[in-house]
Amino acid sequence: MKLCKYSPADELVCLNIFDSNSPPFFAFQERERFADYLKAASPPFYYFVVREVETIVACGGMNFDARERSAKLRWDMVSKDFHRQGIGTFLVMGRLYLICQRPGVGQPRHEPVCISLL
């Protein structure tokens, strides 16, 4: 798997991934807002795709707020046919790594949530 920067050529595939998750994870009415986000995916907004060989199987973004020294993950989704294979985890961890590399992003404001699997 590779985490790659989104390009406008990826738009249709990302919209298809959205459609594969509508419903239950997204409302159909959110599609236009997501499409608008993709068109504006430039700093301080960043968007990525996950490629499995040459197939895009997931997408997700992040944006930075320099004033608040924070970053937020945005519009994460994995194609319905590829759920439960660790791709979503890969997508989140890749972006968290990039966020940690960025100067000026502060420490998390909240204590991490811990889950015990006893």
Image: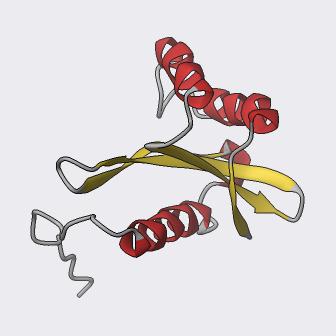
Residue in the foreground of this view, choosing between 36 and 77: 36
**Residue at 56%, 36% in the rendered image:** 41
* Residue closest to the far bottom: 118
Q: Quadrant of residue 54?
A: bottom right
The quadrant the N terminus occupies is bottom right
Residue in the foreground of this view, choosing between 50 and 89: 50
Looking at the image, what colour scheme do you see? secondary structure
x then y, percent, for residue 114: 18, 76
Any part of residue 23 in sight: yes
Q: Is residue 105 above or below residue 33?
A: below
**Residue at 73%, 68% in the rendered image:** 2
The number of discs equals 0
Residue in the foreground of this view, choosing between 81 and 118: 81
Q: Is residue 40 left or right of residue 54?
A: left
Any part of residue 76 in sight: no
Q: Is residue 56 above or below residue 104?
A: above
